[in-house]
Every structure is written in C-alpha cells, then in structure tokens.
Image: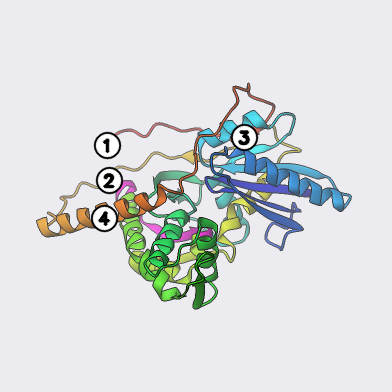
Amino acid sequence: MLVLGVSAGAGGARAMLTHSDQPHLPPIDRCTVPRRAGAGIEEPVFTAINLMRQAAAHRDEFVTGIAVTCRSTLHENAIRATAGRSRLTIVDEPLAQLRYLRFSGQLPDEGAVLLYDLGAAGLTVTEVECRTDAILAVRRSTILGGDGHDALLRWHLAHGGINIDKPTSRSYKEALTHAPVLTASDPHNGRRMVVTRSDFEELAEAGIHHSASYVRQLVDETGVPPHAMALLGGCARNPRIRDSLSQLLDLPVIYDPEPEFVSARGAVLMATQLPSARRVRGARFAQIPALRPAETPPVSKRKLVAALAVTAALGATVVGLLSTNRDSNRPDTHGTAPTPVEVAGTPVDPVPSR
C-alpha cells in the first residue's frame, strides 16, 4: 500500500512517498518545496502532494492515504480550506514525531522526553510523557532558527565583502554540516572568502546557549525531569549543535539520521489509518503536576543584568537581520467552508493555575 506523508512548516513542505510498512527505509520518492515569499502554507503542501501523486502515477500505482502534519491552527485551517475533494488527514506534528520515534525504537517506554525541533522559522520545545503520549508543556521561540542562522552567515560574509542571497546562504550552511571548509563567492564582484565550520559554530553559539536556558525554564515549569532529548529539524544535522546541547543540558540525545524528515515519516504511519478510521486520536495535553514548594535561591544582580543583556542583544541582532527576508506567515483561507478533510485534532484540557 502506497502512502504519502507531508510535514508543513513556516519554511515550506516536505513529502515522503513510501509503502505503509516501510517509513524507516529509503522512500520511493520525496521532495522539499520551499515556501514562496508572501505565499500561504497551503501552496507548498499541495505542490508537494501533486508531485508525489505524479511519481506514483509513473509507477502505475495509486496513493491510498495522505497525512499532513501541522503545528499551527492557522496552517491547519489553510490546508483544510484548500483540500477540496482530496481526502487527507491533518495530524498534530508532535503526535507524528512521537509515532515515528516509537516505531523506530528510539523512544523510551516510560518517562518524559523533550522534542527539540529546530526548524527554519524558530525553535519549538515540547515535553512529552512517553507512556501515555501526553504533552506536558510546549514552548516556541523565534530567536533561534534556520532563517536566523542563514542571516548570521550572510552578515559574516558581508563583513568580508561577500554579498549573497538567502538560498545561497542556506546552501553554504548545509554544506558546512558535511565539509569542514568551503569557499564563498560574490556573484557580482567575484570576491571569494574561505568559511570554516568553526566560523559558523561561533556565530550560532550564543543562540544555542539561549535555547538551553529556554529548555531549562520549560522543565522547571513542569517539574518533570526528562530522560532524553530528541533533536529534530534540519538544523539538528550540525554535529556541533548536537554536542553542545547534550553537554549544556546533560541529557542523552535521540538523533535520527534525517531529522528534518521525522515528521513526514510519522505522517506516513498516520496515513495508514485512513482506510479504517474516521478520526485519528490527537495529542493530549496532560495536567502538569504541582511543583514541589521550594525557596528559589536569589539571583545576583550581576547575573541578572548579564542574562538580560545577552538575550536582548541576540534577539535584536537576529530579528533585525531576519526582517529583510521575512516571509508572510498568514495563510489565505479564501473564505472557503470546511471540506471533508479528516482531522487528527488536539483536545486540550485546561491546566489549572498553580
């Protein structure tokens, strides 16, 4: 049975076409469709779906199930409005990620894990209880992300007289995950500059330290120490980022060889439920256990001022650099009424205030 898994995000869509029982093997076909500036998320999603349907048609096969992962309600509504007569399942992204990590044997049977998803537009940290798949807490930050890394690399090259566009900076960044050194060139003036992996790691270091503090704050809020951390998203391919996070947080790291496709592989597993289920159970938000009463040690004035300064400087630098390349995040629903799309929703139980 041929099925299609698609992951939708602010940067575009990734799709994987494979057999329903082989999401962990090399796929029959796959594609990555970037999101155009000003375009809604539905455009790359359905472009990817059409490309994969064509690939199946070339094999004289039929796609029997399609699942699309979403994290944003706005994205879900845009995809739902554009689906038309297409039957597809919309899945909460953390649920798809958990499903694949468990299928591939990478997830503990019990205890909590952190899903550290570093994508193009930002970082999403989710703490999950493995035995029940209950979500304990979710946090999202736009301070750190692939777009920010691209902007920092362009800023670094601009200081050397090399001016490049966003796609070129992304290709350089991805090349540095495999090669220790590369030569960047300006397409207009012909200037060249050597960039090393260490150069890029120094640029990203402040953001990684910031994200480690971000994770600690989330764990402090839930009061549930995680047993491991799964690094997801294309940025997790950088080995220095993985090593730094493991050391800073003192946690075992779960790392899939293709972290950017974990959501799409999980969607493949969810797509197989279409023939037998009208609705796929979504991720559940658990009640956060009450924190043990304890006196918080006083923070010195020097540390507080330093922390505020680092956060403010990092945020101003990255946000300012991103402002020239920010894509529209507002999906256009075209005023269309809901269509017969099967949705894996996220029933949320209100968390009592502590």
- The disc, 4 or 1, on the residue closer to the chain's N-terminal end is 4
Which numbered mark, 3 or 4, is in the foreground of this view? 4
Relative height, residue 241 to residue 75 (above, below) = below
Mark 3 Cα shell of 10 Å, populated few (<14), some (14-19), many (≥20): many
Mark 2–mark 3 Cα distance, whole angstroms, equals: 39 Å
Would you say 299 lies left or right of 284 here? Answer: left
| Real-space CA distance between mark 2 and mark 4, rounded to the nearest whole angstrom | 32 Å
Above or below, 272 against 22 in this view is: above
> Percent from the top left, x then y, of residue 145?
44, 55
The answer to whether the residue labelled 2 contacts the one labelled 1, judged by CB atoms less than 8 Å apart, is yes
- Which residue ends up furthest to the front in the rendered image? 189
**For the point 25% across and 52% down, which residue is it?**
312
Q: Secondary structure at mark 2?
A: loop
Residue that label 1 marks: 354
Distance (Cα) linking label 4 and label 1: 32 Å
Between marks 4 and 1 in the image, the one whose residue lies nearer the viewer:
4
Q: Disc 2 designates what residue?
A: 291
Kind of residue indicated by mark 4: Ala
Give the label on residue 313, or none.
4
Cα–Cα span, label 3 and label 1: 36 Å
Q: Is residue 250 visible?
A: no
Answer whether residue 229 is magenta in the image.
Answer: yes
Q: Which residue is mark 3?
A: 79
